Image: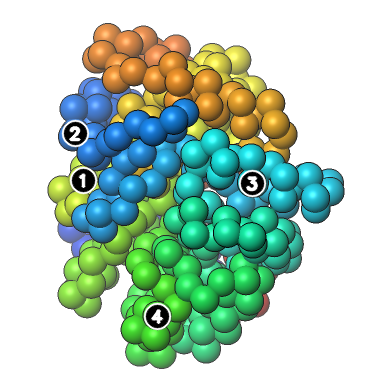
Amino acid sequence: MNISRRDLLKVASTSGLVAAGLAASDRLFGQSLLAQQQSTPAQTKSGEMIYRTLGRTGEKVSLIGLGGHHIGRIPDEQESIKLTRSAIDRGINFMDNCWDYHDGKSEIWMGKALQNGYRDKVFLMTKIDGRTKEAAAKQIDESLTRLQTDYIDLMQHHEIIRLEDPDRIFAAGGAMEAVVAAQKAGKIRYIGFTGHKDPLVHLRMLEIADQNNFRFDAVQMPLNAMDAHFRSFESEVLPRLVRDEIGVLGMKSMGDPYILKSNTIKAIECLHYAMNLPTSTVITGIEKMEILEQAFEAVRTFEPMSQEQVSALLAKTREAALKGEYELYKTSNRFDGTAKNPEWLG
Protein backbone atom coordinates (compact mmCIF):
# COMPACT_ATOMS: atom_id res chain seq x y z
CA MET A 1 0.00 0.00 0.00
CA ASN A 2 1.36 3.42 -0.94
CA ILE A 3 0.76 6.26 1.52
CA SER A 4 0.30 9.78 0.21
CA ARG A 5 2.52 12.66 1.25
CA ARG A 6 -0.43 14.21 3.10
CA ASP A 7 -0.87 10.99 5.09
CA LEU A 8 2.86 10.89 5.81
CA LEU A 9 2.76 14.38 7.21
CA LYS A 10 -0.32 13.65 9.30
CA VAL A 11 1.25 10.57 10.87
CA ALA A 12 4.61 12.28 11.29
CA SER A 13 2.95 15.12 13.09
CA THR A 14 1.35 12.78 15.63
CA SER A 15 4.63 10.96 16.22
CA GLY A 16 6.60 14.14 16.82
CA LEU A 17 8.73 13.96 13.66
CA VAL A 18 9.85 17.06 11.85
CA ALA A 19 7.94 17.49 8.60
CA ALA A 20 10.79 17.40 6.13
CA GLY A 21 10.25 19.48 3.07
CA LEU A 22 7.44 21.62 4.46
CA ALA A 23 9.65 24.57 5.24
CA ALA A 24 10.55 27.08 2.61
CA SER A 25 13.43 26.15 0.38
CA ASP A 26 15.46 29.04 1.75
CA ARG A 27 15.49 27.35 5.16
CA LEU A 28 16.62 24.08 3.57
CA PHE A 29 19.24 25.98 1.65
CA GLY A 30 20.65 27.35 4.89
CA GLN A 31 20.45 24.03 6.70
CA SER A 32 22.26 22.27 3.90
CA LEU A 33 25.17 24.65 4.38
CA LEU A 34 25.24 23.76 8.06
CA ALA A 35 25.40 20.08 7.13
CA GLN A 36 28.70 20.70 5.37
CA GLN A 37 30.16 21.67 8.73
CA GLN A 38 29.43 18.24 10.22
CA SER A 39 32.64 16.33 10.82
CA THR A 40 33.75 14.23 7.86
CA PRO A 41 34.54 10.60 8.75
CA ALA A 42 38.21 9.91 9.36
CA GLN A 43 39.90 9.33 6.04
CA THR A 44 43.14 8.17 4.51
CA LYS A 45 44.44 8.00 0.95
CA SER A 46 46.10 5.02 -0.69
CA GLY A 47 46.96 4.89 -4.36
CA GLU A 48 44.17 6.50 -6.37
CA MET A 49 41.48 6.17 -3.70
CA ILE A 50 40.38 7.93 -0.54
CA TYR A 51 39.04 5.71 2.26
CA ARG A 52 36.71 6.79 5.04
CA THR A 53 35.55 5.13 8.23
CA LEU A 54 32.04 3.62 8.12
CA GLY A 55 30.29 5.03 11.16
CA ARG A 56 31.27 3.35 14.41
CA THR A 57 32.16 0.04 12.69
CA GLY A 58 35.78 1.01 12.15
CA GLU A 59 35.65 -0.39 8.61
CA LYS A 60 37.55 1.55 5.93
CA VAL A 61 35.53 1.92 2.75
CA SER A 62 36.34 3.61 -0.53
CA LEU A 63 34.90 7.06 -1.08
CA ILE A 64 33.41 5.74 -4.33
CA GLY A 65 31.15 2.70 -4.16
CA LEU A 66 30.45 0.54 -7.22
CA GLY A 67 26.71 0.55 -7.96
CA GLY A 68 25.33 -2.96 -8.37
CA HIS A 69 22.39 -2.10 -10.59
CA HIS A 70 24.59 -0.64 -13.30
CA ILE A 71 26.95 -3.59 -13.55
CA GLY A 72 23.89 -5.64 -14.49
CA ARG A 73 23.09 -3.22 -17.32
CA ILE A 74 26.30 -4.11 -19.15
CA PRO A 75 25.34 -6.26 -22.16
CA ASP A 76 28.08 -8.86 -21.68
CA GLU A 77 28.85 -10.86 -18.54
CA GLN A 78 32.59 -10.90 -19.14
CA GLU A 79 32.65 -7.13 -19.64
CA SER A 80 30.81 -6.71 -16.35
CA ILE A 81 33.33 -8.92 -14.57
CA LYS A 82 36.22 -7.05 -16.19
CA LEU A 83 34.86 -3.65 -15.12
CA THR A 84 34.20 -4.82 -11.56
CA ARG A 85 37.70 -6.22 -11.21
CA SER A 86 39.23 -3.11 -12.76
CA ALA A 87 37.43 -0.98 -10.15
CA ILE A 88 38.74 -3.21 -7.34
CA ASP A 89 42.28 -3.29 -8.73
CA ARG A 90 42.35 0.50 -8.68
CA GLY A 91 41.08 0.77 -5.11
CA ILE A 92 37.27 0.71 -5.03
CA ASN A 93 36.41 -1.71 -2.25
CA PHE A 94 32.75 -0.87 -1.53
CA MET A 95 30.49 -3.15 -3.57
CA ASP A 96 26.78 -2.30 -3.75
CA ASN A 97 24.17 -4.83 -4.83
CA CYS A 98 20.61 -6.02 -4.22
CA TRP A 99 18.68 -9.28 -4.26
CA ASP A 100 16.27 -7.93 -6.88
CA TYR A 101 18.63 -6.20 -9.33
CA HIS A 102 17.96 -7.60 -12.80
CA ASP A 103 16.25 -10.65 -11.29
CA GLY A 104 19.45 -11.62 -9.51
CA LYS A 105 21.81 -11.15 -12.47
CA SER A 106 23.74 -8.33 -10.77
CA GLU A 107 24.52 -10.52 -7.78
CA ILE A 108 25.42 -13.51 -9.96
CA TRP A 109 27.82 -11.46 -12.08
CA MET A 110 29.36 -9.76 -9.06
CA GLY A 111 29.75 -13.15 -7.41
CA LYS A 112 31.73 -14.36 -10.40
CA ALA A 113 33.85 -11.19 -10.40
CA LEU A 114 34.71 -11.74 -6.72
CA GLN A 115 36.29 -15.14 -7.28
CA ASN A 116 40.05 -15.72 -7.54
CA GLY A 117 40.84 -13.72 -4.42
CA TYR A 118 38.76 -10.61 -5.13
CA ARG A 119 36.22 -11.31 -2.37
CA ASP A 120 38.86 -10.68 0.29
CA LYS A 121 39.60 -7.25 -1.19
CA VAL A 122 36.11 -5.77 -0.83
CA PHE A 123 33.47 -4.65 1.62
CA LEU A 124 30.39 -6.38 0.17
CA MET A 125 26.93 -4.93 0.64
CA THR A 126 23.63 -6.20 -0.67
CA LYS A 127 19.98 -5.61 0.11
CA ILE A 128 16.80 -7.61 0.62
CA ASP A 129 13.17 -6.65 0.03
CA GLY A 130 11.40 -9.11 2.32
CA ARG A 131 9.36 -7.61 5.13
CA THR A 132 8.53 -10.95 6.78
CA LYS A 133 10.98 -13.24 8.56
CA GLU A 134 10.33 -16.00 6.05
CA ALA A 135 10.80 -13.84 2.94
CA ALA A 136 13.88 -12.12 4.34
CA ALA A 137 15.57 -15.38 5.36
CA LYS A 138 14.99 -16.84 1.90
CA GLN A 139 16.39 -13.77 0.16
CA ILE A 140 19.48 -13.65 2.41
CA ASP A 141 20.36 -17.24 1.53
CA GLU A 142 19.73 -16.64 -2.17
CA SER A 143 22.02 -13.59 -2.12
CA LEU A 144 24.78 -15.59 -0.42
CA THR A 145 24.49 -18.28 -3.08
CA ARG A 146 24.52 -15.87 -6.00
CA LEU A 147 27.44 -13.87 -4.60
CA GLN A 148 29.34 -17.10 -3.92
CA THR A 149 30.31 -16.02 -0.42
CA ASP A 150 29.86 -17.27 3.13
CA TYR A 151 29.04 -13.84 4.51
CA ILE A 152 27.84 -10.35 3.54
CA ASP A 153 29.65 -7.43 5.15
CA LEU A 154 26.56 -5.20 5.19
CA MET A 155 22.98 -6.38 4.68
CA GLN A 156 20.41 -3.65 4.21
CA HIS A 157 16.63 -3.54 4.26
CA HIS A 158 15.85 -2.22 0.79
CA GLU A 159 13.40 0.46 -0.34
CA ILE A 160 12.12 1.73 2.97
CA ILE A 161 9.71 4.01 1.12
CA ARG A 162 6.39 3.51 2.95
CA LEU A 163 5.62 4.68 6.44
CA GLU A 164 4.50 1.18 7.41
CA ASP A 165 7.72 -0.51 6.26
CA PRO A 166 9.51 0.01 9.61
CA ASP A 167 6.57 -1.41 11.53
CA ARG A 168 6.47 -4.52 9.36
CA ILE A 169 10.22 -5.07 9.60
CA PHE A 170 10.35 -4.76 13.39
CA ALA A 171 7.08 -6.60 14.06
CA ALA A 172 6.99 -10.09 15.54
CA GLY A 173 7.74 -12.40 12.64
CA GLY A 174 9.18 -9.48 10.67
CA ALA A 175 12.31 -9.24 8.55
CA MET A 176 14.52 -7.96 11.36
CA GLU A 177 14.25 -11.30 13.11
CA ALA A 178 15.72 -13.01 10.05
CA VAL A 179 18.49 -10.44 9.64
CA VAL A 180 19.54 -10.58 13.29
CA ALA A 181 19.46 -14.38 13.18
CA ALA A 182 21.66 -14.32 10.07
CA GLN A 183 24.06 -11.98 11.86
CA LYS A 184 24.28 -14.31 14.85
CA ALA A 185 24.91 -17.20 12.45
CA GLY A 186 27.83 -15.35 10.86
CA LYS A 187 26.10 -14.84 7.51
CA ILE A 188 26.20 -11.06 7.79
CA ARG A 189 28.34 -8.62 9.76
CA TYR A 190 26.51 -5.29 9.79
CA ILE A 191 22.91 -4.15 9.30
CA GLY A 192 21.50 -1.07 7.57
CA PHE A 193 18.60 0.19 5.48
CA THR A 194 18.04 2.16 2.30
CA GLY A 195 15.33 4.34 0.82
CA HIS A 196 14.85 7.13 -1.66
CA LYS A 197 11.32 8.44 -1.21
CA ASP A 198 11.09 10.85 1.71
CA PRO A 199 13.19 11.74 4.77
CA LEU A 200 10.10 11.24 6.92
CA VAL A 201 10.23 7.52 6.24
CA HIS A 202 13.90 7.34 7.20
CA LEU A 203 13.16 9.18 10.42
CA ARG A 204 10.33 6.77 11.13
CA MET A 205 12.67 3.81 10.59
CA LEU A 206 15.18 5.29 13.02
CA GLU A 207 12.42 6.00 15.54
CA ILE A 208 11.08 2.44 15.42
CA ALA A 209 14.62 1.11 15.74
CA ASP A 210 15.09 3.22 18.87
CA GLN A 211 11.86 1.85 20.31
CA ASN A 212 13.29 -1.64 19.79
CA ASN A 213 16.69 -0.74 21.29
CA PHE A 214 18.37 -1.27 17.94
CA ARG A 215 20.93 0.95 16.25
CA PHE A 216 21.72 0.58 12.56
CA ASP A 217 25.31 0.43 11.35
CA ALA A 218 24.64 2.27 8.08
CA VAL A 219 21.90 4.12 6.21
CA GLN A 220 21.75 4.75 2.47
CA MET A 221 19.88 7.72 0.96
CA PRO A 222 19.92 10.27 -1.88
CA LEU A 223 22.46 13.02 -1.27
CA ASN A 224 22.95 15.53 -4.03
CA ALA A 225 22.82 19.22 -4.89
CA MET A 226 19.08 19.09 -5.59
CA ASP A 227 18.05 17.11 -2.52
CA ALA A 228 19.28 20.08 -0.49
CA HIS A 229 16.31 22.12 -1.79
CA PHE A 230 13.47 19.59 -1.81
CA ARG A 231 12.29 17.07 0.84
CA SER A 232 15.87 17.02 1.96
CA PHE A 233 17.56 13.93 3.37
CA GLU A 234 20.62 16.09 3.88
CA SER A 235 18.81 18.55 6.11
CA GLU A 236 16.54 16.17 7.99
CA VAL A 237 18.32 12.80 8.25
CA LEU A 238 22.05 13.40 7.83
CA PRO A 239 22.55 15.28 11.14
CA ARG A 240 20.83 12.44 13.00
CA LEU A 241 23.13 9.84 11.44
CA VAL A 242 26.24 11.87 12.22
CA ARG A 243 25.09 12.32 15.82
CA ASP A 244 24.51 8.60 16.28
CA GLU A 245 27.71 7.57 14.44
CA ILE A 246 25.76 5.66 11.80
CA GLY A 247 27.63 5.20 8.52
CA VAL A 248 26.29 7.43 5.74
CA LEU A 249 25.99 5.91 2.27
CA GLY A 250 25.20 8.49 -0.38
CA MET A 251 23.41 7.52 -3.58
CA LYS A 252 21.84 9.20 -6.61
CA SER A 253 24.44 11.95 -6.70
CA MET A 254 23.38 12.54 -10.32
CA GLY A 255 19.74 11.58 -9.94
CA ASP A 256 20.24 8.44 -12.03
CA PRO A 257 20.80 10.55 -14.27
CA TYR A 258 18.05 13.16 -14.29
CA ILE A 259 19.95 15.82 -12.36
CA LEU A 260 22.47 15.94 -15.20
CA LYS A 261 19.60 16.43 -17.64
CA SER A 262 18.73 19.69 -15.88
CA ASN A 263 21.91 21.18 -17.40
CA THR A 264 22.61 23.00 -14.14
CA ILE A 265 25.53 20.93 -12.83
CA LYS A 266 28.21 18.61 -14.20
CA ALA A 267 28.96 15.02 -13.22
CA ILE A 268 32.21 15.78 -11.38
CA GLU A 269 30.48 18.59 -9.47
CA CYS A 270 27.71 16.15 -8.47
CA LEU A 271 30.25 13.70 -7.09
CA HIS A 272 32.22 16.42 -5.33
CA TYR A 273 29.08 17.74 -3.66
CA ALA A 274 28.22 14.31 -2.25
CA MET A 275 31.82 13.65 -1.24
CA ASN A 276 31.91 16.93 0.64
CA LEU A 277 29.13 15.76 2.95
CA PRO A 278 29.84 13.44 5.92
CA THR A 279 29.45 10.43 3.63
CA SER A 280 31.48 7.27 4.16
CA THR A 281 31.02 6.29 0.53
CA VAL A 282 29.24 7.74 -2.50
CA ILE A 283 27.69 4.89 -4.48
CA THR A 284 27.58 5.65 -8.18
CA GLY A 285 26.49 3.74 -11.26
CA ILE A 286 29.43 2.65 -13.41
CA GLU A 287 28.68 0.67 -16.55
CA LYS A 288 31.48 1.84 -18.83
CA MET A 289 35.21 2.24 -18.43
CA GLU A 290 34.94 5.96 -19.16
CA ILE A 291 32.50 6.34 -16.25
CA LEU A 292 34.98 4.48 -14.05
CA GLU A 293 37.64 6.97 -15.15
CA GLN A 294 35.24 9.81 -14.32
CA ALA A 295 34.81 8.48 -10.79
CA PHE A 296 38.56 8.31 -10.23
CA GLU A 297 38.97 11.78 -11.68
CA ALA A 298 36.43 13.03 -9.15
CA VAL A 299 38.45 11.47 -6.33
CA ARG A 300 41.74 12.80 -7.72
CA THR A 301 40.44 16.36 -7.94
CA PHE A 302 38.38 16.39 -4.74
CA GLU A 303 39.25 18.90 -2.06
CA PRO A 304 37.04 19.97 0.86
CA MET A 305 34.72 22.66 -0.41
CA SER A 306 34.36 26.07 1.19
CA GLN A 307 30.97 27.38 2.21
CA GLU A 308 31.16 29.77 -0.75
CA GLN A 309 31.74 26.88 -3.17
CA VAL A 310 28.83 24.92 -1.73
CA SER A 311 26.61 28.00 -1.93
CA ALA A 312 27.53 28.47 -5.58
CA LEU A 313 26.57 24.89 -6.49
CA LEU A 314 23.30 25.12 -4.57
CA ALA A 315 22.47 28.41 -6.23
CA LYS A 316 22.95 26.80 -9.64
CA THR A 317 20.51 23.98 -8.88
CA ARG A 318 17.97 25.82 -6.73
CA GLU A 319 15.35 26.84 -9.29
CA ALA A 320 15.37 23.49 -11.08
CA ALA A 321 15.20 21.60 -7.78
CA LEU A 322 12.29 23.28 -6.01
CA LYS A 323 9.52 20.96 -7.27
CA GLY A 324 11.47 17.73 -7.39
CA GLU A 325 11.23 17.63 -11.16
CA TYR A 326 14.67 16.01 -11.49
CA GLU A 327 14.42 13.81 -8.38
CA LEU A 328 11.98 11.32 -9.84
CA TYR A 329 12.80 8.71 -7.21
CA LYS A 330 11.00 11.03 -4.77
CA THR A 331 8.13 12.23 -6.95
CA SER A 332 7.23 9.18 -9.07
CA ASN A 333 7.17 5.39 -8.75
CA ARG A 334 9.73 4.94 -11.53
CA PHE A 335 12.36 3.73 -9.06
CA ASP A 336 10.02 1.79 -6.77
CA GLY A 337 10.74 -1.84 -7.60
CA THR A 338 8.81 -3.18 -4.61
CA ALA A 339 5.73 -1.17 -5.60
CA LYS A 340 5.75 -2.84 -9.00
CA ASN A 341 6.55 -6.24 -7.48
CA PRO A 342 4.77 -6.40 -4.12
CA GLU A 343 5.33 -10.15 -3.91
CA TRP A 344 8.98 -9.42 -3.11
CA LEU A 345 7.87 -8.04 0.26
CA GLY A 346 6.33 -11.30 1.43
The residue sitting at 45% across, 78% down in the picture is 187
Single out the mark in the foreground, 2 or 3: 3
Cβ atoms under marks 2 and 1 closer than 8 Å: yes
Can you say whether 134 is above or below 204 in the image?
Answer: below
Q: Which is more N-terminal, label 3 or label 2?
A: 2
Tell me the number on the disc at residue 186.
4
Disc 2/disc 1 C-alpha distance (Å): 7 Å
Q: Is residue 274 toward the left or the right of residue 103 in the image?
A: left
Give the crowd class for mark 1: few <14, some 14-19, many >=20 residues within 10 Å.
some
What amino acid type is highlighted by mark number 1? Val
| Percent of width and height locating residue 343 | 65, 77
Dot 1: what SS?
helix
Question: Which quadrant of the structure image shows residue 307?
Answer: top left
Q: Is residue 332 toward the left or the right of residue 298 in the image?
A: right
Question: Residue 266 or 187: which is nearer the viewer?
Answer: 187
Q: Which is more N-terminal, label 2 or label 4?
A: 2
Disc 3/disc 1 C-alpha distance (Å): 32 Å
